[in-house]
Image (tube, rainbow, N blue to C red):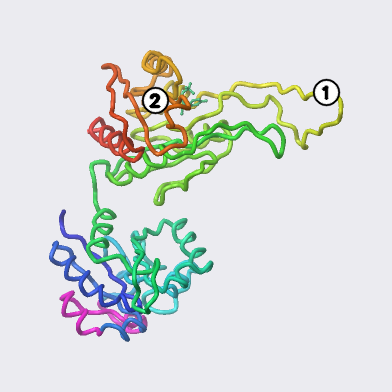
Amino acid sequence: MAGKKILLIIGGGIAAFKSLDLIRRLRERGHSVTPVLTKAATEFVTPLSVSALAGEKVYQDLFDLNDEAEMGHIELSRAADLVVVAPATADLMGKMAAGLANDLASTLLMATDKRVLIAPSMNVRMWEHAATQRNLATLHEDGILTCGPNEGDMACGEFGFGRMAEPMEIVGAIEAAVNDGPLKGRHVLVTSGPTHEPIDPVRYIANRSSGAQGAAIARALLSLGAEVTFVTGPADVVAPMRVNLVAVQTAQQMLEAVNAALPADAAVFAAAVADWRMEHAADQKIKKDGNGLPVLAFAENPDILATVCAGTQKPKLVVGFAAETQNVVENATAKRKRKGCDWIVANDVSPSTGIMGGSENDVTLISKDGAEDWPRMGKDQVAQRLAEKIAEALG
Ligand code: C5P
């Protein structure tokens, strides 16, 4: 990998000593490091040692920079390929989540237009504290990447989660974050999860899709450098970070979101869309009023995959899924033709397979050239293999 520019913000925690090694490891691999120390960090490592290892000036003071003609804080925050915070203390995470900018480090984090990776490090109680976990969730929503913390003995004598990730783990996360990958510059749309079709304000029709396979596909596409729009129904699994996330409930909303996300270079329709909705969902909760059973009238949902394939904005490669319980290959082959997509990932979702809601999948990839049977493997591995095939097909 060509050398990248890393802006490394060192927070004030005992793990700051590991950041000295992180600088060495990054430089050994051809990356350059511009270091920034918070005031608290200087209690743990000296600017002189950081600067000597980085071979660059250490930045510490916001007002120094404002006065300085050579580089202002905005420019400093944007000159890097990636901003890394290691160690990211509870205090720094809190500032980031709240959008505070009262020193150089927090101002750079607010001003940057680059991706940010944090390596949290703190006492286990501080890590588990509701405030830290709330901040972490906010940071994930904001697209901040995290590496660690790990579980283990802590400098304070306690044991648990809160140890900063080891320098080489952080190097790995940094390189994954700046990796261009074969899908760089490509936009891929992924649908995922079930849809919920309301019967009345409290009841709905749904299915058992967990959204695990769709989320894994989105992550695999991201790891190859794609920009991913992730349109998801109410899934059990958390949505991946760094996607353009569109959360929907119903099939009709999913179709609208998909249309709004086009154009795309490729699209993967992994959602388990409900085939039917209520013709008229009730405005109020349907009551047991002693007048017999309610009669539910259904209407057919739009077929999102078929609609996109027949439309003027059909992506170059469209991949559908076929969840079958019998004659998997025959049904999926017919489905590929009927829906007009390029590939179908077919799987047997009979309860005995444990696939729906499970962590593994056993798929057959159907294309115009026939059926390719893949061995049973983890959903992450299926996703990786599919993402690599998509990258190959887009060329
Ligand atoms: O017809 P069936 O539901 O088995 O087709 C599955 C494929 O079609 C999946 O890729 C699914 O995401 C997509 N689909 C859709 N809209 C629907 C139904 C299915 O996009 N209404």
Name the residue rendered at 45%, 69% in the picture.
Answer: 127
Asked if the residue at tag 2 contacts the one at tag 1, i.e. Cβ–Cβ closer than 8 Å, the answer is: no
Tell me: residue 197, above or below residue 218.
Answer: above
Near mark 2 (Cα within 10 A), the count class, few <14, some 14-19 or many ≥20, is: many
Q: Earlier in the sequence, mark 1 or mark 2?
A: 1
Q: Nearer the viewer, residue 107 or 130?
A: 130
Q: Nearer the viewer, residue 371 or 377?
A: 377
Residue 84 placement, left or right of 126: left
Examine the image and state in which quarter residue 300 appears.
top right
Residue 132 placement, left or right of 57: right
Q: Nearer the viewer, residue 17 or 125?
A: 125
Name which residue type carries label 2: Asn
Question: Helix, strand, or loop for circle 2?
Answer: strand
Name the residue rendered at 27%, 41% in the picture.
Answer: 183
Image x and y of residue 54, in percent: 18, 74
Name the residue rendered at 39%, 69% in the picture.
Answer: 162
Name which residue type carries label 1: Gly
Tell me: residue 43, above or below residue 394.
Answer: below
On residue 292, the disc is: 1
What is the spatial separation of the Cα atoms under label 1 and label 2, in whole angstroms? Answer: 40 Å
**Quadrant where the image shows the C terminus:** top left
Examine the image and state in which quarter residue 101 appears.
bottom left
Tally of marks: 2
On residue 123, the disc is: none
Examine the image and state in which quarter residue 207 appears.
top right
Which residue carries the number 2 mark? 347
Magenta-colored stretch includes residue 348: no
**Cβ of disc 1 within 8 Å of ligand 1?**
no
Image x and y of residue 29, in percent: 14, 62
Image x and y of residue 185, in percent: 29, 43
Image x and y of residue 370, in percent: 28, 16
The residue stretch that appears in magenta: 46-70
